[in-house]
Image: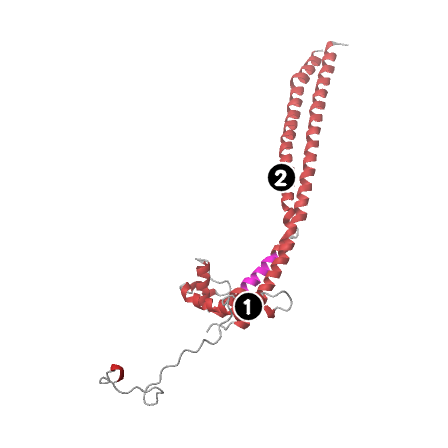
Amino acid sequence: MPAAGVVLIVAVVLIIAAVVYYLVATIFALQKITTGLDEAISGVVGIIEKSAPVNDVVTTINQNLDAGVDLLEGLLVKKAGMPDAVGLVEGLYPGAAAQGFRNFPGSATTKAPRIGEVYTRGTLTLARLGREAPVATASPEGPALRNPTYGSAAARALYPGGRPTVPEPLPRSPIIGTGSPVQYPEGSNGADSGAV
Amino acid sequence: MALEWIGDAVLLLVLLPVVVYLLRGVLNAARSIVPSVEQIAATAQAGSADLDSAALLATTQGQVIKTIEAAAAYGGSLDVILDDAP
């Protein structure tokens, strides 16, 4: 065999060896990539499955919270009036009055009164609710919102010795004049009747 | 005869380096993808684990509904008890 043929064979063998080496290495690298992609896909599928109901649940939660906010804002404005309601919100959350109520566009421009102007009415209302409100008996479908026994006990705690009854009668005022049961002669006991 | 040597020289000096260069490029590219894919897989697994608590949103939803219902009942009572603002 001529030397050129041997060199040719060697060259072809070298080329094939290089091709085999690099292709096998590439195959192993691609296998690692495939394994990694499988893990990534399983993770992404888990994310998709777990996050699928989130949108509906969050939407429902927001709808319920919106309804609650509308209810409470409307009740507050209805019972306290717009200025007092804005003042109360401003007192609880300074700066919130500038944002106003969602369902009352004019509330943002309402001048919030000082909290002291609202506080007296609110205090009296809370005191009345704590003593007299029949809230506990107005919830037949669930437990009492307020424990009437506890509320009554708290009220009774104000008088640990028992609620005071009619006070003891004071001694009557002395009767003076001609109808007095005790008559003192004029000038008796050194009395000076000149100024009477 | 000279043509055979020329062909051998072309194979050894041109074709073989070109093949090696190209295949090495492919191999380096494939190997450079592996760490990125592994990081993506780890991140996806961690993200999936972080969403395990998403199922608790159903409980939150129920609690919110109950809370709003209680607030509505209490508001209804207050609406009856308290006088409206003048």
Chain part drawn in magenta: A59-70
SS type, badge 1: helix
The residue positioned 73% from the left and 9% from the top of the image is: A3
Q: Residue furthest front?
A: A189
Give the residue number, with chain letter if any, for mark 2. B43
Location of residue B35 with respect to A112 vertically, above or below: above
Q: Judge whether A108 appears above or below B48 on screen.
A: below
Q: Report if residue A62 lies within the magenta region.
A: yes
Amino acid at pointer 2: Thr
Quadrant of the drawing holding the C terminus of chain A: bottom left
Disc nearest the viewer among 2 and 1? 1
Q: Is residue A173 left or right of residue B26?
A: left
Work out whether B1 lies above or below A144: above
**Residue type at tag 1:** Ser
Residue at numbered disc 1? A152
In the structure shown, which secondary structural element does the residue marked by tag 2 occupy? helix
